[in-house]
Amino acid sequence: MMGLGSAIGAGLFIGSGAGIQAAGPAVLISYLVAGGLIILVMWALGEMAAANPNSGAFSVYTARAFGPVAGATVGWLWWIQLVVVIAAESLGAAGLLASVFPALPVWLMALVFIAALTAVNLTRVRNFGEFEFWFALLKVAAIVGFLVIGAALLFGWIPGAHSPGLANFGGFAPHGFEGIATALFVVAFAFGGTEIVSVAAAETRDPARSVGKAVRTVVWRILVFYIGSIFIIAAVIPSGSDALKSPFAGVLDAAGMPGAATAITLVAVVALLSALNANLYGASRMVFSLAERGEAPRALKSLTASRVPAVAVLASVTFGVVATVLELIFPDHVLPVLLNIVGSTCLMVWGSALVSQLVLRSRADRDGVALPLRMAGFPWLTSLGLVLLAAIFAVGLIGDDSRPQLLSTFALVIVLAAASALRRRSASAVVSKA
């Protein structure tokens, strides 16, 4: 449920509209490519997490495969990604709530959401898990209902509602290859967060069983929840329509169910808050792990009596507060920027997971180490994932909209790696002098 909690959030309920605007119905290609990639990434991560459950997850695995500088770089990159997403989801939830109750200021609601979920994350992890379970269950039920209504609309089974059929697929790729490339990064944001199950594995009683179950179900989750929802939205709403600002509500309005549109908007608010909750958990555990390994300030590894990294939680939520203040200063300008920042960082993190699994699995097979969970088709499926990733990077460098985002992420990786290497060199110099 944590995998669903993190993955079904702003990317699906808000970002899906941006993806359709960029690529038209051809956004389905973007979702299929990115969906295939995340399935392979989850299989690779599942194998490593079952063998070594650690709150640092892929950061720790990258460090074991390529050294501490690489591990710290990936850890900080993912933490930055999540704190940006926390801000995006608080603002996104507040914006959706304001569309139902216009008198509510977006910035104030965002602050209330952040404060409430910070309080949840400061309690013991069992309470957090229970809270997240019910959050995720509600939005899964809502999406299933949406799929049923959307299918009935397309088949013409709803009296008084015009069925567009597949007419909107006539201009399948209105912006061509470049539109598909641009949408890939929006789609990567939508799938980002699924990997959080590898972080949560460290706080489960039976990591191998829990992670294995999550990995086995990731395929049908992607096919049903993402591909199914996007297909219905693209079929019902033209790519240039203003209804794509709130795509789920737009479909239900087209079905002649205005009350249902308000209801799904409120469910979308819950979905974003659920994702915010899970991402705050993931961000705090990652920076806690970095502190444990000496890659972050020592204060971040302090624990409460309930074994919650409270300082790490508060540090992770700070960016969300800053973003909310910026929303107050620049209304309706902050969320679009945030949605475009994190797509390529997801790809970098997924790439680190794949190459780490390639190295660590080869090392384990060479040394005869038994693994509790083994990725099938190794090394071919891991290599396929890397080929898909390389293709996405190549496509991204071609697109005028995606190239700046990709290059800025590369620059961020270089800065993080240089900072980690410099910190380690300084620490070694101090030890040598002592």
Image (cartoon, helix red, strand yellow):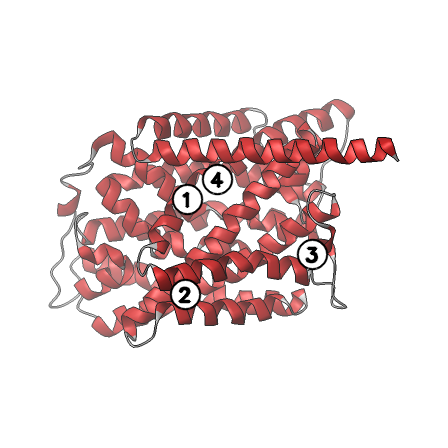
Which residue is nearer to you in this view: 117 or 227? 117
On the image, the x and y values in percent for residue 307 come to 74, 63
Do tag 4 and tag 1 residues touch (Cβ < 8 Å)? yes
On the image, the x and y values in percent for residue 401 come to 30, 35
Q: Between label 4 and label 1, give the one nearer the viewer.
A: 1
Secondary structure under the numbered disc 1 in the rendered image: helix
Q: Between label 2 and label 4, give the one nearer the viewer.
A: 4
Quote the CA–CA distance across marks 2 and 3: 27 Å
Do tag 4 and tag 3 residues touch (Cβ < 8 Å)? no
Query: Alpha-carbon neighbours of circle 4 within 10 Å: few (<14), some, or many (≥20)?
Result: many
Secondary structure under the numbered disc 2 in the rendered image: helix
Query: Alpha-carbon neighbours of circle 3 within 10 Å: few (<14), some, or many (≥20)?
Result: few
- List the residue tagged with mark 3: 203
Q: Which residue sits at x=41%, y=44%?
A: 341
Image quadrant where residue 184 sits? top left
Q: Which mark is residue 38?
A: none
Q: Which residue type carries mark 3? A: Glu
Which residue is nearer to you in this view: 79 or 244? 79
Quote the CA–CA distance across marks 4 and 3: 25 Å
* Mark found first going from the N terminus, 2 or 1: 2
> How many numbered tags mark residues here?
4
Q: Which mark is residue 341?
A: 1
Quote the CA–CA distance across marks 2 and 4: 30 Å
Q: Is residue 162 left or right of residue 286?
A: left
Q: Which mark is residue 345?
A: 4
Secondary structure under the numbered disc 4 in the rendered image: helix
Quote the CA–CA distance across marks 1 and 3: 30 Å
Q: Between label 4 and label 3, give the one nearer the viewer.
A: 4
